[in-house]
Amino acid sequence: MKILKKPSFVALLASKLFYTCVVIIILSSCAYFNTVYNAKNYFREGRKSVRHDTLVTDSENFDKTIEKSTAIIVKYPDTRWIDDALFMMGASYYFKGDYARSLEKLDFLIQNYPESGYQYESQYLIGLANYKLERYGSAVVALREAMNARKFRKKSLIALLYVYYGDANYKDLYEIADTLMNGSLSYDERRTVLRFVSMAQFEEQRYEDALETSSQLLSITRDERERRDLKLRIAEIYLEIGEFDLCRKFLVDETDPEFRDLLADLYLKTGNVAEAKDICSELSQNRMPDVAAEAFYEIAQIYESEDSIDLAVANYDSALVKSPNSEYGLKARKRSEVLKRIQSLTGETEDEVRSQFLLAEIYFADINDLPKALEGYQNVYRNYPKSKWAPKALYAHLWIASYIHGDDTLAATLARSLIDSYPRTEYAMSAQQILQTIESDSSVNGQEP
């Protein structure tokens, strides 16, 4: 009978160590694959919330994707999934709106993993991220690189429409639009192309072309919101080209505030100020603060044009109260402050010359009303030639004549008058420089200044 020997202590220890190592390896392997699986799963779920490359719901899945992808990179730097992790992080940051971090991860992937299957999709997202950051040149470079992949060619071309429109590069926008229209497009894609073409034509003031394109687009568009925007643009074009009757037909039955506001513009342009005021008064009661603020601002503009300063100030202040941080609220604040300064200076009696000069400065610098500014400057240096304000006013007239109106003959006359009348002032020195430039240019051109 064979007697079995009990295993030694060393053998038992070795056996336990072996099995422990096996267990550790298995557990580590499971943790590794679980991390990779979870990262991919969260990313896949997150993509379900994306429409047209834009996140439409929450970003919780993308937050978890970033967390798991970071774990892959930190714990398993030699894994074959490293480019997957970098791409998922970069894409997640893009969809979350963190474009700077998105570019950081995707650029690193492009530079360090040139054989990755994510190269072209990364270039596409890099293009979109740069567009969002208004880095239009970099966006174009990335999107044109992404176009080399058939899968991203059309998407990149459409994205370039956004980029070129944002950059006001209408020549290249039209070329991209022609390329797309000569290919196979879905209904939505065709609408997108025509929409950008019509907007670009409008911005370039090619109103006849914009009208044709917008009308073509309106005939095929079923979306009510888009139809509204198109009808508004068509009405704006009619207003710009002087087709007032056609413009009115587009506007009279519309209740939307933007249409009503455009109708007020139409009435102003055709001299029907009373109707324009009525519409603006109606809009000033709108429940939307921004709409009401714009209406009050436009009423104030009408009163200001009529030199009814008190009423203008009152309506600017109403616009400010309605929506203080909106575009028209901020513009109203500035305009109200300027008019109140005018009121204050107009009523000043102690130093009338100073007041007239400062009023001219306000009309020139703040209101951009050159005729009133020049009237004020001329009144100062002609009627009060001994005043300390006279050389300043004369130099202001000289500066406007030279640099704004480009009237060298008048500028030379004013410069000589300033030098002769106020020879020891700093304004005479500046006038001498302007006169020398005029005489030098005239000598070159063979003319007398």
Image (cartoon, grey):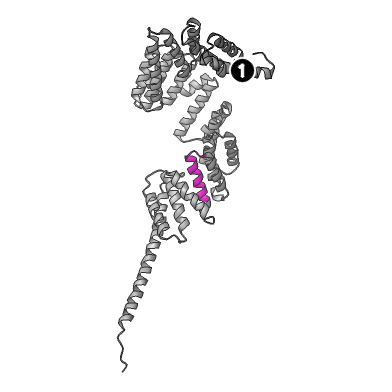
Residues 321 and 278: in front is 321
Classify 256 as above or below 383: below
Classify 137 as above or below 422: below
Residue farthest to the front?
Answer: 424
Question: What percent of the width, then of the height, locates residue 119?
Answer: 52, 52
Which residue is identified by label 1? 436
Q: Is residue 442 visible?
A: yes
Chief secondary structure of the magenta span? helix
Residue farthest to the bottom?
Answer: 1
Query: How many neighbours does mark 1 have within 10 angstroms: few (below 14), some (14-19), or many (20 or more)?
Result: few
Classify 67 as above or below 53: below
Question: What percent of the width, then of the height, locates residue 81?
Answer: 46, 59
Report if residue 307 lies within the magenta region.
Answer: no
Image: magenta residue range: 120-135
Question: What percent of the width, then of the height, locates residue 181?
Answer: 58, 40
Residue at left 42%, top 49%?
Answer: 92
> What amino acid is found at the position of numbered circle 1 in the picture?
Gln
> For the image shown, how many numbered marks are present on the structure?
1
Classify 340 as above or below 192: above
Q: Helix, strand or loop at disc 1?
A: helix
Question: What percent of the width, then of the height, locates residue 414?
Answer: 56, 11
Residue at left 39%, top 62%?
Answer: 32
Residues 187 and 97: in front is 97
Residue farthest to the top?
Answer: 383
Quadrant of the frame with the C terminus = top right
Residue at left 36%, top 48%?
Answer: 60
Q: Is residue 158 visible?
A: no
Quarter occupied by residue 338: top left
Residues 395 and 251: in front is 395
Residues 297 and 444: in front is 444
Is 140 displayed left or right of 356 in the figure? right
Quadrant of the frame with the N terminus = bottom left
